[in-house]
C-alpha cells in the first residue's frame, strides 16, 4: 500500500495539471495579451474604463495587473472603473460619463454596449475606444483566438 500511496502522491499533480492551471485558458491569455498591448499603447495619464457586462471582475483585474506591473508609479494609465455583471442594471452611458474615462476597453460587445457608446463594434473581438470631442472612436480590436464567447470555454 505504501508504494501505491507514493505513486498516487507523485502522479496525481502531473495528471491534474491541466485542471489546476486555470490561467492557461485561451481567454485568459487574451486578457494578458491585451493588457500588455494597452500598457504599450495608452499614453501616460490615460484614464481607462473597462466594460465587461457578463463578467465578475476577473477581466478588469487581469488587465489592470498587466497595465501596471512594469510601470513607474504615476506613469501608468489608471483604471478608473469597470462595468460588469453587478452593474448590468445601470446605464452604461451614464456610468462611463461619470468615470471621466479617456479610453474604454470592451471585452465583449453587445447591442447595449454599441448603443450606449454609439460605436459599431464587430463581434468575436475585444476593443479599445478613445473619447474625442464627446464621441467614442474605435482605436484597436483584438480578435478572439478561435472562440466565440469569453465565458464559454472551448474545452
Image: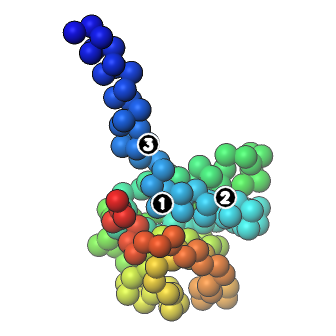
Q: From what the image shows, is residue 15 above or below residue 86?
A: above
> Which of the two labelled residues, at mark 3 and mark 2, occupies the earlier sequence position?
3
Q: Is residue 135 above or below residue 141?
A: below
Q: Quadrant of the N terminus?
A: top left
Q: Earlier in the sequence, mark 3 or mark 1?
A: 3
Judge whether residue 81 can be spotted in this image. Answer: no
Residue hosting label 1: 26
Q: Quadrant of residue 95?
A: bottom left
Total marks in image? 3
Neighbours of disc 1 within 10 Å: few (<14), some (14-19), many (20+): some
Nearest the eye: 101 or 11: 11
Residue at the left extreme of this rendering? 1
Point out which mark residue 36 bears. Answer: 2
Distance of label 3 from label 1 (alpha carbons): 12 Å
Q: CA distance from mark 1 to mark 2?
A: 15 Å
Quadrant hosting residue 25 = bottom left
Task: Give the residue at x 36% y 43%.
Answer: 19
SS for dot 1: helix
Within 10 Å of disc 3 (Cα), the crowding (few <14, some 14-19, many 20+) is few
- Compared to residue 78, the image places residue 54 above or below, namely below
Above/below status of 33 relative to 110: above
The spot of residue 107 in percent (x, y) is 48, 70
Assess whether mark 2 and mark 1 are in contact (beta carbons under 8 angstroms). Answer: no
Say which element carries label 2: helix
Amino acid at each position: 500500500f505504501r508504494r501505491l500511496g507514493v505513486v498516487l502522491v507523485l502522479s496525481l499533480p502531473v495528471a491534474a495539471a491541466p485542471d489546476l492551471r486555470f490561467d492557461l485558458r485561451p481567454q485568459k491569455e487574451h486578457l494578458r495579451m491585451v493588457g500588455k498591448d494597452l500598457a504599450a499603447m495608452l499614453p501616460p495619464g490615460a484614464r481607462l474604463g473597462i466594460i465587461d457586462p457578463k463578467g465578475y471582475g476577473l477581466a478588469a483585474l487581469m488587465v489592470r495587473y498587466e497595465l501596471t506591473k512594469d510601470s513607474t508609479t504615476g506613469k501608468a494609465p489608471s483604471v478608473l472603473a469597470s462595468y460588469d455583471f453587478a452593474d448590468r442594471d445601470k446605464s452604461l452611458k451614464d456610468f462611463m460619463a461619470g468615470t471621466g474615462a479617456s479610453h474604454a476597453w470592451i471585452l465583449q460587445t453587445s447591442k447595449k454596449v454599441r448603443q450606449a457608446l454609439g460605436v459599431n463594434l464587430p463581434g468575436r473581438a475585444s476593443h479599445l475606444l478613445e473619447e474625442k470631442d464627446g464621441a467614442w472612436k474605435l482605436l484597436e480590436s483584438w480578435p478572439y483566438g478561435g472562440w466565440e464567447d469569453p465565458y464559454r470555454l472551448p474545452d
